[in-house]
Amino acid sequence: MRNDQSIDINQTAELIRQAHQACEDAYAPYSCYKVGAAVLWESGRITSGVNVENASYGLTVCAERNAVFHGIGLGERRIKAVAVTVPREEMPSPCGACRQVIREFATDCLVLLSNGGGEIRQISLNDLLPDSFGPEFLK
C-alpha cells in the first residue's frame, strides 16, 4: 500500500492552486487563521477543503480533514499527495489529527506546504508522522 510520492510539476501546481483557491472560503472568524487544503487521489481526482471554526472550539474541523472526507464521500480511498496552504508568511503544517487521518488512506504520501509568499516545502507523510499506526495493524 506504499504510495509513489512523485507527482509532476503540473500536478504540483494544480494541487497548490486548488488549495489556495479553497483557502479564500475558509471560515475562521475566531483565530483569523485561514487554511486551504487539496488532496490528489491515486485516481487523479483532486478534492479540496477549508478549515471551519466553531464558537465551541472543539467542533472546529481542519482543512486537511475536510479535503480528505470530501474525497471519501466521492468513493476515493488512496491518497497520492496533499497540499496545505495559508495566506500568511509562515509555513503551515498539518496538526497531529490531520496527519493521522491522512495516514489512514496512505502509508506514505507527498505533503506540499505553501505560504502566502509562494514558498513551497515538500515533505513526506512519514517524516511528519514517523513510526505511525495504520489500519494494517488491525488485521
Image (cartoon, rainbow, N blue to C red):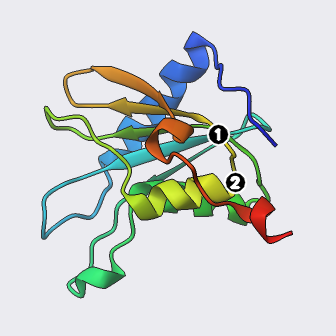
As drawn, which residue projects farthest toward the front?
131
**Image coordinates for residue 132, horizontal then vertical, percent:** 58, 54
**Image coordinates for residue 32, horizontal then vertical, percent:** 13, 58
Q: Would you say residue 90 is visible in this rendering?
A: yes
**Disc nearest the viewer among 2 and 1:** 1
18 or 113, which lies in front? 113
6 or 11, which lies in front? 6
Above or below, 59 relative to 76: below
Q: In this rendering, would 100 be left or right of 2?
A: left
**Image coordinates for residue 48, horizontal then vertical, percent:** 52, 48
What SS does tag 2 mark? loop
Which label number is shown at residue 121? none
In the picture of the structure, the residue carrying the numbered disc 2 is: 105
Residue type at tag 1: Asp
Locate the C terminus and report the quarter of the image it occupies.
bottom right
Other residues around mark 2 within 10 Å, as few (<14) / some (14–19) / many (≥20): many
Q: Would you say residue 50 is visible in this rendering?
A: no
Above or below, 38 relative to 69: above
17 or 86, which lies in front? 86
Residue at image location 16% in from the left, 35% down from the top? 90
In the picture of the structure, the residue carrying the numbered disc 1 is: 108
Q: Quadrant of residue 59?
A: bottom left
